[in-house]
Amino acid sequence: MSGNKAHNWKSSYNSIFDQKLQEIKNEGHYRYFNEIERKAGQYPKALHHKDGKTKEIDVWCSNDYLSMSQNTEVMSAMKNAVDQLGAGSGGTRNISGTTRFHVELEEKIAKLHSKERALAFNSGYSANDSALTSILSAIDNCLVLSDELNHASLIEGIRASKREKVIYKHNDVEHLKAVLKGIPFNRPKMIVLESVYSMEADFAPLKEIVEVAHEHGALIYLDEVHAVGLYGENAAGIAEQEGVADQIDIINGTLAKAFGLAGGYIASSNSIIDFVRSFSKGFIFTTSMCPAVAAGTLKSVETVQDNPEIRSKFFENVKLVKSELEKAGIPFLDSGSHIIPVIIGESKLCRKISDYLLEEHQVYVQPINFPTVPKGTERIRITPTPSHSKEDIKKFVNAITQAWIKFMPKHEQLISSNIQLKK
């Protein structure tokens, strides 16, 4: 084949991808990465690099809820682990990739959730995807009941299992009951849901879900990624806070949000954890978490539990930001959680507001567009931390107020009427 023919042949494939990319650019859904360099010890201060220029900014959209990635004890634990073991784990958990840090971390997680055992993954997404795929695939004729706003990792794990799935309306216990009505008690079932939904900022009605599960003989798989480390007496999440942790069969959590590092996990019974460890391809064939990450996360969990004032300051700042936004007349979703979504309602406008805040006010809040949220509900998602000072909060609220005045008066009708905003 001549060089020209080969080039044309390759180009026909590239044109497919280029066309798809152009479509999402035209719709305003293309994702642009901002180069952000957080300043250790000075968070939420960070450096924004663009077009050869660097500006200091304030970060307001990180999932590092408690600023634990900046904690000196956590950083020291990671440095010490590197000095002791080196940078990487060297293999999968089965082939030289299990260190004492991995073992101790899993023991700590199991204790955190009052479960028999836990299993650590490289990400919360991988934990959900791998665990659900393997667990559901093993249960013949299992019916999966999935909340309509579940995270993509839960959806993909269910889909890959090839089990029958029914989607129930978000947080609608009556609809869940209606779906289950007439399903034989002895047919295997699993209810899959989250405790805190990161885009709607609301809580699942866990007590009611547990009652439904018991009545219909269903297992419960609960994603606590946006709650673990924050809620509950021992920072174990909403299930602990609501007093139903012992009724939840499988808990998924992350080490990348409130605990500030990277990785995910599931916590459950000995049988389920050993089964996933032995059958999940996503676990078996993946190089294990770096020892330094395991060591740092172990220290982070301990630090959060031993220092309740970190969480107290966090919730104090969440309350203050909400109060100041109300005073400024900025509408936001408020279901009582720590997450503060401000609905914009149109993807290109959402990007313009985000760019304006970053370039004109040195405030970074990433736009959240489709497919993360439905079209017409695009938003910016504000996440205060205990590291934000009152001055930072004042600056932020002033910046978003200026953005609202500049962009929103002619566009507020774009906000979906079915979204309940708090003024």
Image: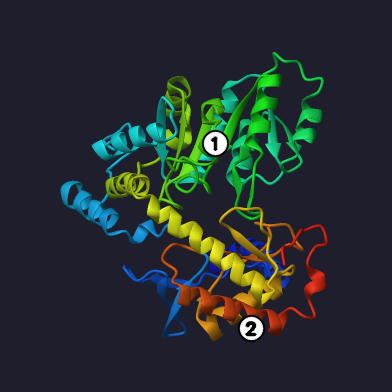
Residue type beneath disc 2: Gln
Query: Is there any visible trace of residue 96 in the rendered image?
Result: yes
Q: Determine contact: label 2, label 1, CB under 8 Å.
A: no
Picture quarter containing residue 207?
top right
Q: Residue at x 40, y 38 (%)?
A: 120
Image position, residue 19 (x, y; %) = 69, 66
What residue is shown with label 2? 402
Q: Please tell me which residue is depicted at 53% across the width and 61% down the height of the picture.
A: 318
* Element on which disc 2 rests: helix
Give whichever of discs 2 and 1 has the lower sequence position: 1
Query: Total label count?
Result: 2
Up/down of 189 relative to 11, above or below: above
Q: Is 417 or 165 nearer to us in this picture?
A: 417
Within 10 Å of the Cα at label 2, are there few (<14), some (14-19), or many (20+) other Cα atoms? some
Q: Is residue 328 left or right of residue 233?
A: right
Above or below, 186 relative to 35: above
Image check: 121 left or right of 84?
right
Q: Residue 359 location, x and y as percent?
A: 54, 83
Residue 239: numbered disc: 1
